[in-house]
Amino acid sequence: MTQFPQPATRATAKLVIAGGFGVGKTTAIGAVSDITPLRTEEVLTTQSTATDSLRGIEDKTTTTVAFDFGRVGWDVPDPVELYLFGTPGQPRFWSFWHDLSEGALGAVVLADTRRLESSFPAADFFEQLGLPFVIAINRFPGTTPRTAVEIREAFDVDEQVPLMFCDARNADSVAGVLITLVQHIANTKSANSALLDA
Ligand SMILES: Nc1nc2c(ncn2[C@@H]2O[C@H](COP(=O)(O)OP(=O)(O)OP(=O)(O)O)[C@@H](O)[C@H]2O)c(=O)[nH]1
Ligand SMILES: [Mg+2]
């Protein structure tokens, strides 16, 4: 009987995609996911648009009210299967963040340079949780460019936290962010175990 090579067993990891209202979390998971993502979108009410600015995202008509779920895997450089959980961005749904982060190995804090401050709470949340995270700036067209140094200063995070630019609509770009996060998780783990061994 022909022996076919077995597919590589993939390590699995749960990752969280967080950030402020309308920064592109649902878009990013939809772009990179190998499966049709699970979404919990509800139509934006005039009540919520009074509290959450739609500046720069005037076409946005819905918002995530619970979570997004997507899955992406690859075999190179290492076989890995990532389960992606997107958080809701509106402050009234922030209570979900704890539950969504349960068992996660790391997080992406997505941000929009026009409203950077809307993603500060997400960075603070993961910092306090002690969960490794990266900051990814979703470059919306027509926005005034800001340097990585300026953005890092605004976030006031540890210099070890990776910061990069991306396009939430582009699968390769989002995959690049996820690869950076996976590497950051691995580096943080080996740094922590080195500390424990010391
Ligand atoms: N031009 C442009 N539009 C984008 C980009 N990313 C997202 N959008 C649009 O911006 C809007 C917000 O995207 P969402 O993915 O819903 O944002 P979100 O962070 O999930 O929003 P909430 O769940 O409501 O917090 C949508 O209308 C997207 O089509 C981008 O990179 N460029
Ligand atoms: Mg969303």
Image: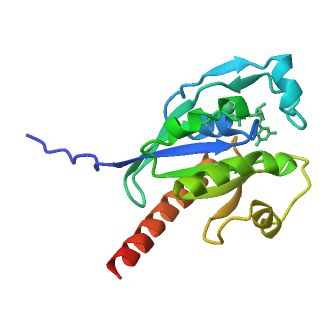
76 vs 123, left or right, is left
Query: Residue 158 location, x and y as percent?
Result: 65, 69
The residue furthest left is 1
The residue at 47%/69% (across/down) is: 187
Q: Viewer-proximal residue, 147 or 122?
A: 122
Residue 195 falls left or right of residue 115: left
Question: Which picture quadrant has residue 92?
Answer: top right
Which residue is rendered at x = 67% and y = 35% of the image?
27
- What x and y, as percent, mark residue 24? 72, 39
The spot of residue 69 in percent (x, y) is 52, 32
Which residue is located at x 79 percent, y 22 percent? 61
- Looking at the rendering, the quadrant in which ligand 2 lies is top right
Q: Quadrant of residue 155?
A: bottom right
Q: Is residue 90 visible?
A: no
- Of residues 66 and 168, which is closer to you in this image? 66
Q: How many marks?
A: 0
In the picture, the quarter occupied by the N terminus is top left
Note whether 36 is above or below 136 in the view shown.
above
Residue projecting furthest to the bottom: 198
Give how far across and how far down residue 12 sits, in percent.
37, 47
Q: Nearer the viewer, residue 155 or 57?
A: 155
Identity of the residue drawn at 73% across and 48% down: 119
- The way the protein has been coloured in the rendering is rainbow
Q: Quadrant of the C terminus?
A: bottom left
The reply to whether residue 185 is in sight is yes
